[in-house]
Amino acid sequence: MNAIKVGVMAVEHDLIGITRESISHYEAEKK
Amino acid sequence: MNSNKNITIAVDAMGGDHAPRITVEGACRMTLESPVNILLIGDEGWINGELEIHKYNRDRIRIVHTPDVITMEDSPKTAVREKPEASVLLAAKYLRDGKADAMVSAGSTGAVILSTAMYIKRIPGVRRTALGIIYPTLSTLKRSNMHSLMLDIGANVANTADDLVHFAYMGVSYKKKVLQADDPAVGLLNIGAEKHKGNETMKEAYRLLASRSDLNFIGNIEGNELMSGKADVVVSEGLTGNIAMKTMEGTSDAVKQFMMKPIMEGGLISKLALSCLSGKIKNAMKFASYEEYGGAPPSGMTSPSSRPTDGQHPTRL
C-alpha cells in the first residue's frame, strides 16, 4: 500500500479516533 | 467512515531525493486510481514541468506554490526555523487548518517529524510519535492482506517502556482499522524470547504489555522471526526498528541479485528456463519487494500523515 493510500485509509477508517480511545483507556487505567 | 466525502491529501511535492519527479508521478497515478484530491505543494514551475509528462485527472490535482524546500542535506532543526514556507511545513499547516485530511511527504524523516510536531497536536497522553512500516511476511503467502506492521522505525532513537505500550496501541488500531485484522498479535522486538531478556526498558515494556488484557501480546520476538508473520504488530524502539527495517530491505535486494546474477550470466539453457518461469519469478519478486509496501504511517498525532520509506519509487507514494 503506498503512502497516499495509507493516508486515505487512515481518514476513511477514523484511525485517529480509535487510537485516541485505546491510549486514553490505557492512561486512565494506569492512574 | 468518511467515504461520502472526497478526501484531500497534501503532498510535499519537493520531499525526497528524486522529487518532484517521483512525487508528481505518484500523485498522478493516484488520481487515475482513486477519487482522491491532491494538493501538490512545492515549486509550481517544476511541478508543472513534471505534470506535462504524465496522465492524470486534472480535476483532482491543485498546486500550492512555494519555492522553499528542506533538502536531505539540511539540518531539519535549523531548516524548519529558517524555511518556514518549506513544502513539508506548508503541508503540515494545510493539515492543521483543515484544508487537507492527511499529508504525505517523502522528505527527510527529521523534517517530516518536526513539521508535524510543530503544527499537529499529539494524541493526549502520547509522549512520542512513531513511524511505522507495513511489510510482507510468510503469512502473506497464505492471505494477501496479512502484512505485518512494525513501529517505531526511526521517529525516535530511545523510548520508555510506556512509549512502547503506546506504540502497541497505535499499531493494533492501524491493523484493525486499516488492514482489517481481528485480533492482531503484538510482539516486542528484543534480543531473546524470554521475558528477562534485554535492557531495563525492554523488561518493563514486556511487563506492561503482558499486563494488558486488551492486547494480544505474544511476548518477545527476535529479528529472525520478523518475516515469519508470528506478530502482526511488532513494537520496537526507533533505533532498533530502523536497523531491522533497513536490514530487511537490503536483504531483499541482495536476494534478488543472488538469484538473478547466475541466471543472467548463464548460458542459453539458463535464459530459456528464465523465460519459462518469468511470470512466476516476477510475481515472487513483486511479493517480496519492499517497494510494494511503501506507506509508512506515522502514529500518535491527532491528524494522519504518511511517509514512504524512501522516495525512489512512484508506486510507494
Image (spheres, coloured by chain):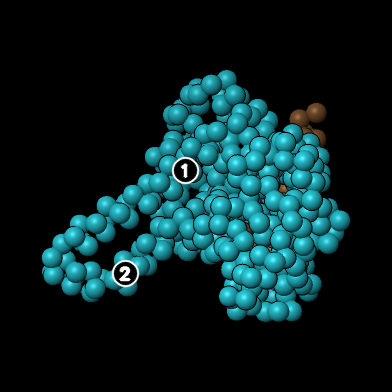
Chain colours: A brown, B cyan
Identified at 56% across, 52% down, the residue is B17
Q: Amino acid at mark 1?
A: Lys
Q: Which mark is residue B280?
A: 2
> Residue B273 placed where, x, y %?
19, 70
Q: Nearer the viewer, residue A13 or A26?
A: A13
Residue B21 image-quadrant placement: bottom right
Kindly identify which residue carries mark 1.
B246
Q: Position of residue B231 (x, y in %)?
A: 50, 45
Q: Position of residue B313 (x, y in %)?
A: 51, 60
Question: Viewer-proximal residue, B7 or B50?
Answer: B50
Residue B26: % across, % down: 59, 66
Q: Nearer the viewer, residue B278 or B176?
A: B278
State the residue at coordinates (73%, 52%).
B68
- SS at mark 1? helix
Q: Is residue B298 above or below residue A8?
A: above
Task: Tell me which corner region of the image, top left, top right, bottom left or bottom right, holds residue B224.
Answer: top left
Please give left or right for residue B192 compared with residue B296 in the image: left
**Disc 2 residue crowd, few under 14, some 14–19, many 20+, Cα 10 Å:** few
Circle 2 SS class: helix
Location of residue B262 with respect to B219 vertically, above or below: below
Q: Check disc 1: other Cα within 10 Å, few if <14, some if 14-19, many if 20+.
A: few
